[in-house]
Amino acid sequence: MLRRVRQSLRQVLFLMARRPALLCGTIVLGVLLLLAVKFTCSRAKDVVAAARPPVRFFSAEAPVVDLYLGQLDQVERLRSVAEVSLIFFYAPWCAHSMAARQEVQQVAKKLAKQVQFVAVNCWWNHGKCRKQNRFYQYPIIHLFYRRFGPIEYKGPFVAPYVESFILRVITPLTYLPSRATVEEFLSYHEPRVVGFFQFNSSPQPPGYITYLSSALQALKRDFRGVVRFGVVTNKLVADAISLKEDETVYLYRRFNSPLIFPRRERNFTSEAICSWVFEHHETVLQWLQPPGTKSRLLEHELTKGPALLLFLPHNPLGSKPNPLLQQVADIAVRYHSCVNNNHGFSSNPLCCQSVLLPESSTSVCEVCLSSSRSSLTSSSVRCSFSSSTAQGGDMLQDYLRHCCLHQLPAVSIKTTTSAGCTNFLNSYSPFSQYSACCRKVEPQLNESQAKEEPDLQGAPLTPPPSSTPPSSAPEQGGDGITGLRCQTNRTLRFYVLDVALNWPLAVRLGATGNRSAPPHQGAGSHGDGSFAAIVNLKDEVHYVLHRSPASTLTESLEAFIRNFSAPYSLLQRHLVGEEERRGGGGGGREEETGQHSPPRLLIKELTTSSFLPSVMDLQKDVLLFYYTQWCGFCSVLNHVIIQLARLLQGNSTITVARVNVARNDLPWEFMVDHVPSILLFPKYRKHSSVKFPEDLPITLPNLLRFILQHSGSVQYADKLVPASSEADGLGPGSILRAEFLALQREVQALRHARERLSQQLAQLWRDNRRLTFDALSLEAENTELRRERQSLEEQHREKSRQLGEAVRRLQELADTSESLLNENTLLRVLLRALKDRTEFKEQAEVERKEAEQRRSHMAS
């Protein structure tokens, strides 16, 4: 081994002696290669630029502590020194956070002395807020009342609503010092809770803090604070609501008896009190505020049953109650008041059902089941008609035909309603009896009549005669709305929405105007800024309240509710269309520009208002195409419909039309179960509409064959011809002549269509030939590009091989350089050892000589 090392050292020394530049070049090349690799790796780390440090989100003048670095530990310190704190979690890039910033700054300037406002950047990745919290949306507002919290605010980020919520958190309890204030506190329609605590023995009784926390727990569930909490400290004031014991919680209910919190059955905790209140409270008027466009809150409420949606102007910071809201609340309370001693309601509940008789088209008979059992109440009654009664059986129809129907002709024709009533005992149940009434019913108005008389829906109706005998009929009040909830199976739920925040929803339901300033006139919009509509999601219909200028909101709403609850209502279903949303501005522009006759389009676009006049045109065959903007199959068929319209462009008796069923409501008889769908409404016989077969492909030849097969021209002779027409010479011969002329026109139109089709086919052939030449040229270019690609691949392989060879040589040089360095080091060690040995021998020789000299000197 030592021999090989010596030989290597000799070779290195020989090379260094012969060619010293070779070793230096190898070392320099290796150092450059190492520097290049290091530089490349360092640049790979700097591909993604570091995030910029955050800056202040709120302005310096705003009284808001902006923790823009996400210092979550500072929040606890700031909360500990404040009575009420508002924490605003935001993301700097979030548009909602930017919009809410101005609103929070506005509230902070007003309440800075009472509330500590803190804003935290919860998006900065180096901050503690981002590391400790996982928020899925921004912004988020948390409020803390002393040590209680967080109370999350889930309302709209509008300054009045945020300020109102903060004020509710600051004063969650209302102090009631006198009986008058207690009566006023309990007079509102919202659920009210009163707590009785005496402050004689201690500054704060033991249960007072728990009661205060329960009020804050209620704000967690409802940001509007609909359930109000009051506190009474005087025993004489507590006697007004029959509170005797201290630390008592009292829930006032308008329709049922009040309740006292059962402390023996439940623990006296804030969560238990809050849950008990929300389980037993009564709500007749509910506020709705969908948090966003994708919210399903409205759908969840509408699935419960018919709903009356009232859009009212609302100011959360108003010192006085809203008069419109008070009127609506009064109507809702009277509507739900099923048992009212002032009006002397009978304790016998009623269930009524209408029975249609084929003998009379203008009469209807109503059968009411009146229970004689005193144990039943209005809340426990259940309708139990027999099968023959529910289905209009022969026994019941025969009885009504003999007992009631003969009384109708004796009534004057001028009267709007008439009735003849009788009773008979139900043989199947000895505890109940039927009462039958027959009366005339006015026919419902069509859409044209409803437009001519727009105030009919809002005008009060004459209440129908009672369908029960005087002994068992309830003595209703004069308003006709009190207790209506328990007299009909179309129970309404009352919902209130802020018109300023939910104006797009009102417009979708039928209101007109813009969002910033709702109009004083128009469909459903009134001078006081209100809008009302009844939505029945189960039947997929909704009705809009049309108010007359002379009627008040109370009168119009009562008539609106009565008309909806009546068995045969005069309310007309409101159809929403595109023209109604635009407000009909297109016609006015045409009049201003003088375009009295707009150019005819290939395909006629139908809307809600123009649907019936266009489809029901007796002089034209209408081919109707149902589509939506989200239907992909409808888009695929557009070119087929356009080609068909071009072919039929010269035919004045056939109209090709389409309707967007997603943006235009249509009457029930014209709806389809799926899109795309094609229907043909033949002329002279619109009732015999034909649907394009689903198993047949929608192509141009099939559509033409479908139109020619079901066109209304071949059935023109089926029309009834009056006797005067026969006398004037317009008999069957004239009809056949007119039919022959119509057929000639159709044949001529088909010839023109064939010529246009031939021209189109020729153009298509030329286009096909041009495309063939283009394909050949593209193929040649593709071949040339393929050859260039092969040559480039060969060059790439050659360059790769050369580069690999260079790398291999560099690797050999690096290995040789490393071996030379090792041999050089070993050579230096050996040279050092030889030098030390030589020096040792020389020193030993010198010492020997000195010793010999000393001996010779001693010898002499």
Image (cartoon, helix red, strand yellow):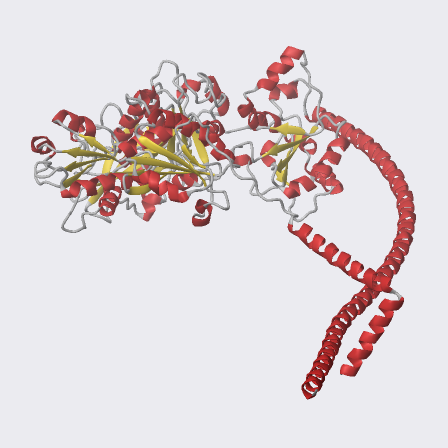
User: Is residue 341 among what the camera can see?
Assistant: yes
- Residue 315 in which image quadrant: top left
Where residue 439 appears, as percent x and y from the top left, is: 32, 29
Does the image show residue 442?
Answer: no
Q: Is residue 487 or residue 830 the one in the foreground?
A: 830
Q: Nearer the viewer, residue 693 or 207?
A: 207
Placement of the N terminus among the 4 image quadrants: bottom right
| Quarter of the figure that contains the C terminus | bottom right
- On the picture, is 678 further left or further right than 297? right
Where is residue 682? Give x, y as percent.
65, 33
The one nearer the camera, 727 or 820, is: 820
Q: Dividing the picture into quarters, in which one does residue 465 lie?
A: top left
Q: Quadrant of residue 290?
A: top left
What residue is shown at x 26% (from left), y 23% (from top)?
Answer: 479
Q: Looking at the image, which residue sits at the far front?
A: 860
Tell me where residue 303 appears, x and y as whole percent. Answer: 40, 41
Q: Is residue 547 above or below residue 129?
A: above
